[in-house]
């Protein structure tokens, strides 16, 4: 399988959200797109999936432009997990996962559909959630259901494009790693996985390649060791960081430098409190004296009233 992105741009309200991005991906690759908020990552992913049409340029899957596939053909070629998947109806986790098989059967799911759903839910750790309403699940649990739905769509494909936009949102550590391990395992079987992550260390651990974006453009493209340098981290994220290679795993590790702030520099109330500290003490003393005088006057008034 082969994916080619050729000089893709996306313009909205006379502003480029994506500008002249090109790269290719082949079977077996797992590529993570990194970048700060607003870098254009999700816009790019929506064009890779066919949800948005580029203002210019082409997205080509296996030698054919993505816009030339019909819906059924495209569903067999690619599956996408969106960044946000709101659910307002109490579908069960099983029903939502089965939605990934829509279009593959007419009236009732067949054996292959049931197997795809069962195995997808099992690998995502959802066996105990099958009959649970989505409305009763936590954010991380819901995200795992949507991941299972995405996997079920292409479960019986031998090669496909899997697009994951922030797939581990709200998940705990165990299922963050489990979900990325699933993606990596499928890439080893010939799938292409392209995903957006915010955790650069997870990207380094599970990706064969990283594309770093800024201002709607592709700035760097290469192995984690090539892309995740201190200079690139500061350029893309405005964060000072140290990077090194773990000698056991041979994975790149990014250690951001701690940001230390003084609350006095961004909240003037603290400054005023310090400047007026002595005045506050004086006011407190005055309040105590005034309270004592008031109580004495109240006693005198009460005595006078009681004695006519």
Image: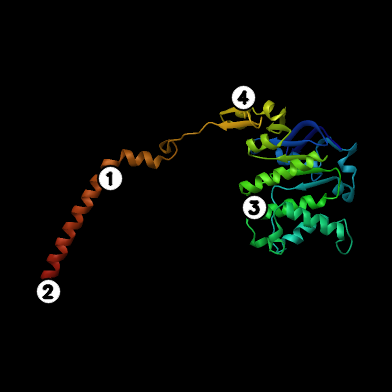
Mark 1 packing: few (<14 Cα in 10 Å), some, or many (20+)? Answer: few
- Tell me the residue that label 3 is attached to: 140
Q: Secondary structure at mark 3?
A: helix
Q: Secondary structure at mark 2?
A: helix
- Tell me the residue that label 2 is attached to: 306
| In front: label 3 or label 2 | 3
| In front: label 3 or label 4 | 3
Q: Is residue 73 left or right of residue 44?
A: right
- Tell me the residue that label 1 is attached to: 280
Q: Is residue 233 visible?
A: yes
Residue 18: horizontal and vertical position, in percent? Answer: 74, 35
Q: Quick one: quadrant of the C terminus?
A: bottom left
Q: Secondary structure at mark 1?
A: helix
Q: Is residue 16 visible?
A: no
- Tell me the residue that label 4 is attached to: 231
Residue 95: horizontal and vertical position, in percent? Answer: 76, 61
């Amino acid at each position: 399988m082969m994916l080619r992105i050729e000089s893709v741009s996306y313009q909205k309200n006379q502003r480029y959200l994506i500008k002249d991005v090109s790269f290719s991906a082949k079977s077996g690759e797992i590529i993570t797109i990194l970048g700060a908020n607003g870098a254009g990552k999700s816009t790019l992913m929506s064009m890779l999936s066919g949800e948005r049409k580029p203002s210019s340029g082409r997205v080509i899957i296996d030698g054919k432009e993505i816009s030339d596939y019909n819906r059924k053909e495209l569903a067999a070629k690619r599956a996408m997990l969106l960044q946000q998947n709101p659910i307002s109806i109490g579908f069960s986790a099983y029903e939502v996962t089965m939605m990934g098989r829509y279009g593959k059967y007419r009236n009732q799911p067949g054996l292959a559909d049931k197997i795809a759903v069962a195995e997808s839910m099992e690998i995502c750790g959802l066996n105990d959630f099958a009959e649970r309403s989505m409305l009763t699940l936590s954010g991380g649990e819901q995200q795992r259901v949507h991941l299972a739905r995405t996997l079920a769509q292409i479960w019986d494909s031998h090669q496909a494009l899997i697009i994951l936009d922030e797939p581990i949102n709200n998940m705990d550590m165990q299922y963050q790693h489990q979900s990325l391990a699933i993606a990596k395992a499928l890439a080893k079987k010939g799938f292409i996985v392209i995903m957006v992550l915010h955790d650069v260390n997870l990207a380094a651990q599970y990706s064969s390649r990283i594309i770093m974006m800024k201002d709607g453009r592709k700035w760097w493209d290469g192995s984690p060791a090539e892309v995740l340098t201190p200079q690139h981290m500061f350029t893309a994220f405005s964060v000072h960081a140290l990077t090194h290679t773990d000698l056991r795993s041979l994975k790149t590790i990014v250690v951001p430098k701690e940001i230390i702030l003084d609350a006095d520099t961004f909240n003037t109330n603290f400054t005023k409190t310090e400047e007026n500290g002595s005045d506050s003490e004086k006011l407190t003393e005055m309040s105590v004296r005034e309270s004592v005088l008031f109580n004495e006057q109240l006693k005198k008034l009460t005595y006078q009233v009681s004695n006519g």
